[in-house]
Amino acid sequence: MKLSLGQAAKEAGVSKATISRAVKHGKISAEKVGNQYEIDPAELFRVYPPNVSETAERNDAQPVHNAVNDIEIRMLREMLDAKNEHIEDLKSELLQAHKEKQSLLAAPTPRRRFLGLF
């Protein structure tokens, strides 16, 4: 989503003229569509940090809790538990394979005799 000049000014906490000058001087890149500029938020915030008061207002809002969110959280936790269980199983298998390897390396090898024809 691109921002208009006014939206960009509001998000950055500066005037529209400041944003306009920054675009004209190449400080911020923008695309001109018709008579208006469209500014990518990442490009805007590269030069001007987000307006602290606007950000604070958004962060003060309480998160919305509803049944859909609760179900999604429960499902994600179940998936995480399953993944963690799988990781533990793989660790156990790896440890067992390592022990088997060590026991095979420690076992004495039978001596071979050379049966030459000489």
Image (cartoon, rainbow, N blue to C red):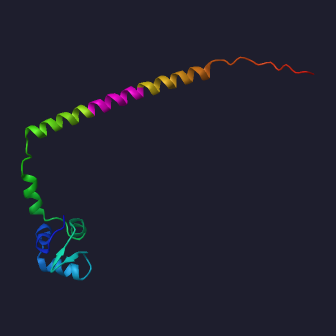
The quarter of the picture where the N terminus appears is bottom left
User: Residue at (13%, 67%) from the top-left corner?
Assistant: 11
95 lies left or right of 25: right
Nearest the eye: 21 or 32:
32
Q: Could you say which quadrant of the image residue 65 lies in?
A: top left
Residue 32 pos. (x, y %): 21, 78
Q: Is residue 96 magenta?
A: no
Nearest the eye: 56 or 87:
87
User: Residue at (8%, 37%) from the top-left corner?
Assistant: 67
Residue 29 pos. (x, y %): 26, 75
Relative to 86, say whether 72 is above or below. below
Task: Name the magenta segment's main secondary structure.
Answer: helix
15 lies left or right of 29: left
Residue 53 pos. (x, y %): 9, 62
User: Residue at (12%, 63%) from the top-left corner?
Assistant: 52
Q: Could you say which quadrant of the image residue 44 lies in?
A: bottom left
- Specify the farthest residue to the front: 34
Query: How many tags in the picture?
Result: 0
Residue 5 pos. (x, y %): 14, 74
The quarter of the picture where the C terminus appears is top right
Q: Could you say which quadrant of the image residue 110 lies in?
A: top right
Q: Point out the stretch of residues depicted in magenta.
A: 80-91
96 lies left or right of 76: right
Relative to 29, say whether 83 is above or below. above
- Specify the farthest residue to the right: 118
Nearest the eye: 112 or 103:
112
Relative to 63, say whether 76 is above or below. above
